[in-house]
Amino acid sequence: MAELCLENVTKRYMAEKRPVCAVRDVSLTVEQGEFVFLIGSSGAGKSTLLQLMGGEIAPDEGSVCLNGANMARLIGPWRVRAARTFGIVSQQGLLIRKRTVGDNLLLAANAAGMRRKGKDAVKKALGIVGLPGVEARYPAELSIGESRRVELARAVLNSPHILLLDELTANLDDDVIWDLLHLLMELNSHGTTIIMATHASQYVNILRKRVITLVDGRVVGDVKKGKYGDIVG
Ligand code: ADP
């Protein structure tokens, strides 16, 4: 089980010697098993908020707590254990182009400490995302939709409690988006928390999950069974 709690979280960047406030005074809690859409226009702070939630970056003010423990203060094995709570798909895509899909996932499995069980975990993860047997292919030989599935397989390798997904559905055809969303709902039905930044308004409106809306780094809406554009708490 993993509960994520953000209290008065603020994150600033220096951009061309001027501070940019990417996330402003955000407080929210995400319980285990929730499905959350994070929405807002480009630059609203969605990616930064996901990185803060996953402990990839630390806030300048406030705290991000996983099961009550402030992630910025975790060290050594506690930090490693916290990191393994999360499966992350970032916007950049992390597949190494010169390695096969199998090698890519095996490297990730090794990094997650699954040395002996790595191969089995890779096979299982590719099965979960509906791409069994693609181990020998190279990332360049995959469609965008298949690449996203492989990224997702990478993220679910060690059965994380929480999936943090940044624009997983960007630039995909409708049927591929639906397939991915069904996959995420299936994972969610087994208890995995899904927190997903997206611009895919029509799907957000159909699925009616929790919708957190960011404008200029602030949460302006947090609605259970919400819709795109809801700006109430
Ligand atoms: P979104 O994901 O909603 O597009 P981001 O979190 O990427 O928003 O960005 C929020 C704001 O922070 C933007 O103004 C962006 O330019 C700025 N920003 C994000 N990352 C960095 C960075 N590494 N350095 C400087 N500014 C950044």
Image (spheres, helix red, strand yellow):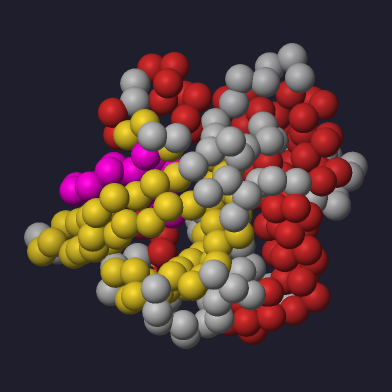
Specify the quarter for ligand 1: bottom left
Residue for point 47% across, 24% down = 80
Residue 74 percent location from the top left of the image: 34, 25
Occupied quadrant, residue 28: bottom left
Asked whether residue 15 is in view, the answer is: no
Residue 157: % across, % down:
69, 35
Residue at 28 percent of width and 74 percent of height: 216
Q: What residue do we see at 66% from left, 46% from top?
A: 192
Q: Does 211 sit above or below residue 131? A: below
The C terminus lies in quadrant: bottom left
Is residue 83 in the magenta section? no
In front here: 17 or 96?
A: 17
The spot of residue 140 in percent (x, y) is 71, 54
Nearest to the observer: residue 4 or residue 197: 4
**What residue span does the magenta drawing correspond to?**
49-65
Q: Is residue 12 above or below residue 79?
A: below
Q: Is residue 63 magenta?
A: yes
Q: Is residue 110 left or right of residue 181?
A: left
Image: 126 above or below 23 = above
Percent from the top left, x then y, of residue 190? 75, 46
